Amino acid sequence: MKSFRIVFLSLLLMCLGSGCAINPEKVGGFNLISVDEEKQLGDKFAAEIEKEQKVVNDPEVQAYINRVGQKLLTGVEKVEFPYTFKVVKDDSINAFAIPGGHTYVNTGLIKAADNEDELAAVMAHEINHVVARHSTRQLTQQYGYSLLLQLVLGQNPNMLAQLASQVFGKAGSLYYSRGMESQADYLGVKTMYNAGYNPVGMEKFFKKLQAESQQEPGKLTKFLSSHPLTSERIQSVDAEIAKLPPKSYQPSPTESEFTKIKAKVQKL
Ligand SMILES: [Zn+2]
């Protein structure tokens, strides 16, 4: 009996450490921050981020990324936030979504993607961190509920600026648990499938990044440093794709636009 209890306790501790308590199919977990508070917090963070990062000043590029984002939203489980999609001038391969659904795509990601499916894959992953409300859960755990509430209420502008930079800025990153990352992959594959993007694009893009980082270990991209691409992770994506009902994917009507936008971004 005693040894059973020890096994149970060690399993529980392992779960707490790796975040394996997350059921990937369940998006509505416990969250101290309300949806409304998250929207307010997100708007405040967005204003700070856009002071630090350079939003690309090209209406055609912005309209395109917004179209890809809106198309992906047709495939998510629930849309609780007013999502926005913007391209920022930063050549590291990354995209990030902050509380409330403000999603930023680096120019480096557009340059690294070979087609719209690959670009949509990373965006689908990021959107689902918002859908499952991972950032507010993670921020509450790291910084405490009362501090976040102060930020929502605008009581601590210095801390807001500091945190925005530390967590979402060029040099910073919000690290999610492994369970949260797997959930964003799991939901991301479903989102791509539902929205009409071929989820194989996710597997291909992850494999490509993994191969590049093995060839040149020094060239670890921002996306890889916050999202370790283990073979296990790629295998899970592959296994999930295999479970989806067969579908013939139509080439995206915006595919030719992808090539045009990529060429434009390369010259920025
Ligand atoms: Zn992630």
Image (cartoon, grey):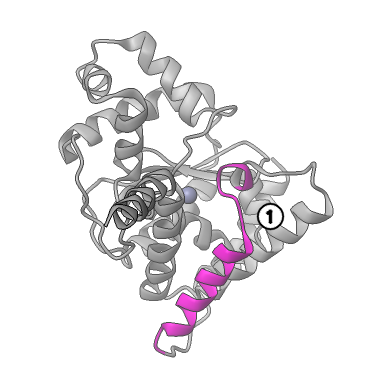
Count every numbered label the image shows and give the total.
1
Say which amino acid is labelled 1. Answer: Ala
Q: Which residue is mark 1?
A: 112
* Residue nearest the observer in this picture, 145 or 111: 145
* Residue interval drawn in magenta: 224-245
Residue toward you, 183 or 246 = 183
Q: Residue at x 63, y 64 (%)?
A: 231
Q: Quadrant of the N terminus?
A: bottom left
Classify 10 Å Cα crowding around label 1: few (below 14), some (14-19), many (20 and above). Answer: some
Residue 238 falls inside the magenta stretch? yes
- Mark 1 and ligand 1: say if the CB distance to the nearest ligand atom is below 8 Å: no
Q: Is residue 222 magenta?
A: no
Residue 234 in which image quadrant: bottom right
Quadrant position of residue 255: bottom right
Q: Position of residue 260 (x, y in %)?
A: 64, 59
**Residue 183 spot, x, y in % from top left:** 39, 59
Residue 3, given in percent of the width and then of the height, sits at: 34, 55
Q: Secondary structure at mark 1?
A: helix
- The answer to whether residue 216 of the structure is visible from this angle is yes
Q: Main secondary structure of the magenta part?
A: helix
Which residue is located at x 56 percent, y 42 percent? 226
What residue is at 29 percent from the left and 31 percent from the top?
140
Q: Residue at x 58, y 65 (%)?
A: 232
- Using the image, determine if residue 135 lies above or below residue 79: above
